[in-house]
Image: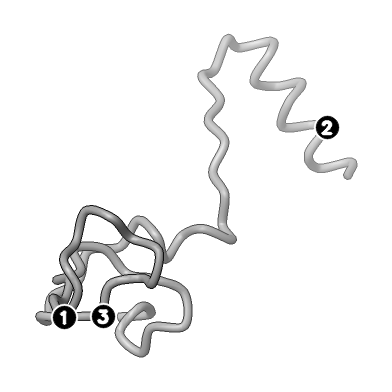
Amino acid sequence: MTTIRLLLSLASIYNWELKKIDINNAFLHGDLKEDVYMVAPPRSTSIPPGKVCKLKRALYDLKQANR
């Protein structure tokens, strides 16, 4: 905590721009290089039954998420 306080103090003194990131959701912002398809969620109303979705972003528990 001392290091964080020091960095926040320096940012305040030197008018540095601070940004916050959420590491727990990092995989949600990753682009996929492979084509990955999934069955539509059961309660989705915009996707007809029997159709699949092509993912553009990684999801949790997806094998390709950490690439």
Q: Residue shown at 33%/60% (left/top)?
A: 44
Badge 3 marks a residue whose secondary structure is: strand
Q: Nearer the viewer, residue 11 or 21?
A: 21
Tag 1: residue type? Gly
Disc 3: which residue? 39
Q: In the picture provided, is 41 more to the left or to the right than 4?
A: left
For disc 2, the marked residue is 5
Name the quadrant of the N terminus: top right
Q: Name the mark nearer the viewer: 2 or 1.
A: 1
Q: Farthest residue in the bottom direction?
A: 63
Q: Quadrant of the C terminus?
A: bottom left
Assign a secondary structure to mark 2. helix
Specify the quadrant of the image occupied by residue 51.
bottom left
Q: Which residue is mark 1?
A: 50
- Asked if labels 1 and 2 touch by Cβ distance under 8 angstroms, the answer is no
Which numbered disc, 3 or 2, marks the residue closer to the eye?
Answer: 3
Q: Dot 2, how many residues are within 10 Å of its Cα: few (below 14), some (14-19), or many (20+)?
A: few
Question: Image point 16% across, 80% down: which residue?
Answer: 50
Question: Regarding mark 1 in the picture, which secondary structure is present there?
Answer: loop
Task: Name which residue type carries label 2.
Answer: Arg
Which of the two labelled residues, at mark 2 and mark 1, occupies the earlier sequence position? 2
Report x, y in % for residue 9.
77, 21
Q: Earlier in the sequence, mark 1 or mark 3?
A: 3
Which of the two discs, 3 and 2, labels the residue nearer the N terminus? 2
Residue farthest toward the right in the current orientation of the protein = 2
Picture residue at 57% right of the left edge, 9% below the top: 15
Expressed as whole percent of the image width and height from the top left, the position of residue 18 reads 56, 25
Please say if 32 is above or below 62.
Answer: above
The nearer-to-camera label among 1 and 3 is 1
Q: Nearer the viewer, residue 48 or 12?
A: 48
